[in-house]
Every structure is written in C-alpha cells, then in structure tokens.
Amino acid sequence: MLVALFVCGCSSSGVPRVSGTSPARAPAILFPLAADSVRFTSGFGDPRAGGRTHHGQDLFCAKWTPILAVVNGTVDWIASGRPKNGKSYSILLRGDDGNQYFYDHLNNDNPGTKDNLGDPDLAYAPGMHDGARVTAGEIIGYVGDSGDAEASGPHLHFEIHLRSWDDPVDPGPALHAALARRDASSGRRSRP
C-alpha cells in the first residue's frame, strides 16, 4: 500500500555531520517515516561505547509512527520471534538500486505499555517476512524503543550502506533531500 505523505514540521539538531563521505554519494530515497514532526539527533559518526561510531541518523518521533520503505526492494531479514533482552526489532531492506537500508528500534511493546513483550506483529506491518517484496512508500513497520533505545525514547535508527554492508554513508543528506521533495510535492515551504 502506498502512503501519501505530508510533513508539517521538522526540527534538526544542526547540519548533519559527514564523516569522510560526500553528500553526493547519498542515493535518492523517500523519507522513511509517515510523521508530521521528526527530530534528528545522534548523527552519523557520533562516538559510541567501545570505540564504535554511529553509522546512521536517529529520527525521534511518536511511538507507533508508520515506517516506510524508502525504495522498492526486498526485505532481507526481520526477527521472526521476540528478540532476547537488549536486542531490537529491525529490518534490512535490499533496495532494487543495489543499496542496503537498515531500520532499527522498531516497536517491542504491547499497546499502552512499556513492557518490552510485544511480538513481531507489533513491530512489523502485516505481510512482512524475509523475502517480502516492498514498494517505496509502503508501510513496513512501526517506531518503537526496542533494544538499547529504551532509555532514549522511541525513534527510528536509519542507515544507508552503498552496495555492501562495509560501505555505510551518512543518510542525513538523503533524508533532508527526501523531506525537501516531500515538502515541494505538498506545496509546503522548504525547511532551513
């Protein structure tokens, strides 16, 4: 199912940092959330525990916000059972464009709770399974706080990997461009 998207506002914690990556490398995508307001934080390259770096952008919005396929492609993997404590519901989408798109921290709570006991049908849209074909704009899941996102609150962690998992790029430029295109198509003013 294609979803008509309209964004009323988006605030950013600043210009997304690009760590050794040219914004021109970011592919054209649809915005991954059907949200009226999204806050970008924890950008690409931010330090993480154990000397790791953040390979995505965190998009904070309301729990249960529909998550959308950013391109046509195939669902490579999702959790078929409830993740163990500390693990999250996530999706890896292999785009027809040859790139990989990783969505993390999908919902793991039963409605009206923060119980961390939600089954996969509360994280993923109906019909999602390994090998499912999806169309850009189709609902594939729902925002939550699974895994290590419990303390920070509901958000979508979103990554883009060009051609292979070993080539993560800052998704910030592609996300901001997707918002600008969505604004232009809906007649809204562009964001700063």
Image: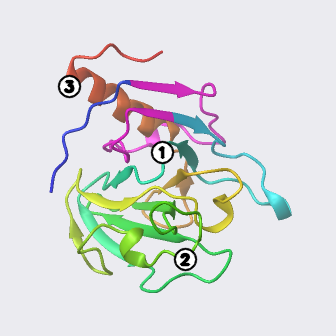
Residue 3 appears anywhere in the view:
yes
Name the residue at 28% across, 80% down: 131
Name the residue at 40% across, 69% down: 122
What is the basis of the colouring in this image? rainbow
Residue 100: image quadrant is bottom left
The residue to which callout 2 is attached is: 117
Q: Tell me the SS state at disc 3.
A: helix
Q: Which residues are magenta?
A: 9-38
Q: Earlier in the sequence, mark 2 or mark 1?
A: 1
Residue 81: % across, % down: 46, 86
Q: Mark 2 or 3, which is nearer the eye?
A: 2
Question: Depth check: 137 or 159 in front?
Answer: 137
The residue to which callout 3 is attached is: 185
Name the residue at 82% across, 60% down: 49
Q: Tell me the SS state at disc 2.
A: loop
Name the residue at 68% across, 74% down: 86
Q: Earlier in the sequence, mark 2 or mark 3?
A: 2
Q: What is the three-letter code of the residue carrying label 1? A: Ala
Residue with the most extreme front position: 112
Magenta includes 89? no
